[in-house]
Amino acid sequence: MAIKIYIDQGHNRGVNAGAEGFGLYEQDVVWQVGMYLADLLNNTPGYEAKVSRPTIDTVLGYNATTSLAARVADATNWGADYFISIHANASTNPSYNGSEVLIYSNLSQSFPLAEAILQQIVAELGTKNNGVNINPRLYVLRRTAMPSLLVELAFITNPQDAEKLRNNQFDFAQAIYDGIRIELG
């Protein structure tokens, strides 16, 4: 039986739009990273992946809350074993940089997977390790029935991170994939 991984490419174009920086739009960057990740997983025996936004123009919901609810409901209805939401971080301080993974609780099944994914992103892309952090307020972490995590690839508002988000989208997907394979087999 395949391990089913739901890949949520955070945000939409328009409704519940993401961050912007250096001519990049979070919703576009994470869409492409998610598509690469789904392709890697779907071409690996023992895995099955589904994305929240099959096209770059797919819009889920009509506001932030309904957009998040639609993603969680889709993953639940599909019977996902894991929920991975992909995002790009942002700050008003352009010196903030690096990668982090957010989870609901360090006691959850998400914790070892989050650690493996973060370790691979840092190793493969050379981003700063901002840790696995607990954030039980995030809708996609507290409302999912399956182990879930939210990956902040890098800061779209930092010039060096933004270059990686622009030029290394496949590499981010590969690093997440490698972390999944290390932890889940």
Image (cartoon, rainbow, N blue to C red):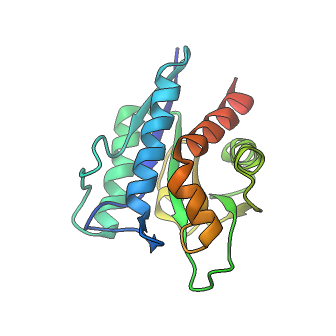
Measuring from the top left, give residue 25's x and y in whole percent. 40, 65
Task: Indicate the quadrant where residue 150 lies.
Answer: bottom right
- Left-right relation of 173 to 114: left
Count numbered badges in the picture: 0
Q: Residue furthest bottom?
A: 92
Name the residue nearer the viewer: 176 or 111.
176
**Vertical order, 40 against 97 (above or below):** above
Measuring from the top left, give residue 45's x and y in whole percent. 55, 14
**Vertical order, 41 against 173 (above or below):** above
Measuring from the top left, give residue 105's x and y in whole percent. 69, 57
Image quadrant occupied by the C terminus: top right
Measuring from the top left, give residue 121's x and y in whole percent. 69, 48
Name the residue nearer the viewer: 110 or 91.
91
Q: Residue at x 36, y 50 (%)?
A: 71
Q: Residue at x 53, y 62 (%)?
A: 88
Q: Residue at x 67, y 33 (%)?
A: 178
Q: Residue at x 43, y 48 (%)?
A: 8
Name the residue nearer the viewer: 92 or 53.
92
Name the residue nearer the viewer: 160 or 74.
160
**Vertical order, 110 against 19 (above or below):** above
- Left-right relation of 96 to 60: right
